[in-house]
Image (cartoon, helix red, strand yellow):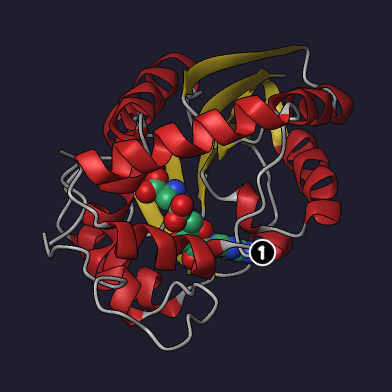
Amino acid sequence: MPENNSSDKKDTVYASPMTSVGAFKFDENVADVFTDMIERSVPGYGLVLQLIGLLAERYAQESTNVYDLGCSLGASTLQLRRHIPASCHAIGVDNSAAMVERCRSNMGRDHSAATCEILEQDIRDTEFSNASVIILNFTLQFIDDDERQTILNRMYEGLNDGGIILLAEKVRFDDEDKQTLMTDLHHDFKKLQGYSDLEIAQKRAAIENVLVPNSEALHLERLNTAGFATVMRCMHCLNFSAFLGIK
Ligand code: GEK
């Protein structure tokens, strides 16, 4: 389990019947239970966190910036901090005040040598410079579809040669049968983690139009278009994938 949160509260946000389900927001209620929510909702989440540590060990360059975009409570930021040289600076960015407040407090309890700052900011406004590692761990999926390429292009520009981007996303399948099967299996996975049919249905209604997944082919194409010399998928579990781009 990632040690990223002082709270280990169970996610019951969608446990009671709602007369109408509002659009999903990263508010106080979600931030309070976020570790439990993401661990029980995203198959492979823990594995991607470990992968982030391995990539940071290999690709973080001395005296550079490493970025964690959409840092939430800081699970990926902590992986970065613990695996980068002491001369690096870790920058976490999130536009949810509730997440940022808790993330800063989580970072305050970590004693890694590398310095760290958590910015309350929209990643569309983040400036990237002297970067060796940029992490987008299940964040790009919340940005307007037509803005995704521009953000990736800017990240590429801010990366030093040999730097990397790790992009993890929920993905969709163009083939309708595959899309249905993966969606069903994902819901089976959530039931296995203890979510009820009601919780799954209400969360699904809330997240629709908020989290908009792309196909794997489109993610790979975007990374190629941004200019990355090497682009590959490095993790895949049901309808969740992670992609690596190396400059
Ligand atoms: C982890 N990476 O645990 N600008 C900044 N932050 C944003 C924006 C935006 N435009 N849109 C959404 N967010 C984390 C998990 S969660 C993934 C990332 C999920 C933030 C949002 O506030 C939330 O904290 C995060 O992106 C997405 O490794 O909930 O599936």
Q: Quadrant of residue 187?
A: top left
At label 1, the amino acid type is Asn
Q: Quadrant of residue 165?
A: top right
Quadrant containing the C terminus is top right
Label 1: element kind: loop
Taking depth in this image into account, of 116 and 49 the one nearest to the observer is 49
Give the side of residue 173 with respect to residue 94, left or right.
right
Residue 80 in view? yes
Q: Quadrant of residue 214?
A: top right
Which residue does the image show at 72% across and 41% down from the upper left?
A: 155
Give the side of residue 2 with respect to residue 231, left or right.
left
x, y (%) of residue 62? 47, 25
Which residue does the image show at 40% across and 78% down from the upper left?
A: 27
Task: Return the residue found at the far bottom.
Answer: 19
Q: Which residue is mark 1?
A: 209
- Looking at the rendered structure, the number of numbered marks drawn on it comes to 1
Residue 92 in view? no
x, y (%) of residue 201? 42, 61
| Disc 1 crowd, CA 10 A, few/some/many (<14, 14-19, 20+) | few
Give the side of residue 127 with respect to residue 137, left or right.
right
x, y (%) of residue 74? 33, 53
Taking depth in this image into account, of 179 and 107 the one nearest to the observer is 179
x, y (%) of residue 81? 32, 39
Q: Is mark 1 within 8 Å of ligand 1?
A: no
Q: Is residue 99 above or below residue 166?
A: below
Quadrant containing the N terminus is top left
Q: Is residue 27 above or below residue 219?
A: below
Give the side of residue 144 with respect to residue 106, left or right.
right
Which residue does the image show at 53% across and 27% down from the upper left?
A: 241
Taking depth in this image into account, of 148 and 23 the one nearest to the observer is 23
Which residue does the image show at 53% across and 29% down from the upper left?
A: 181
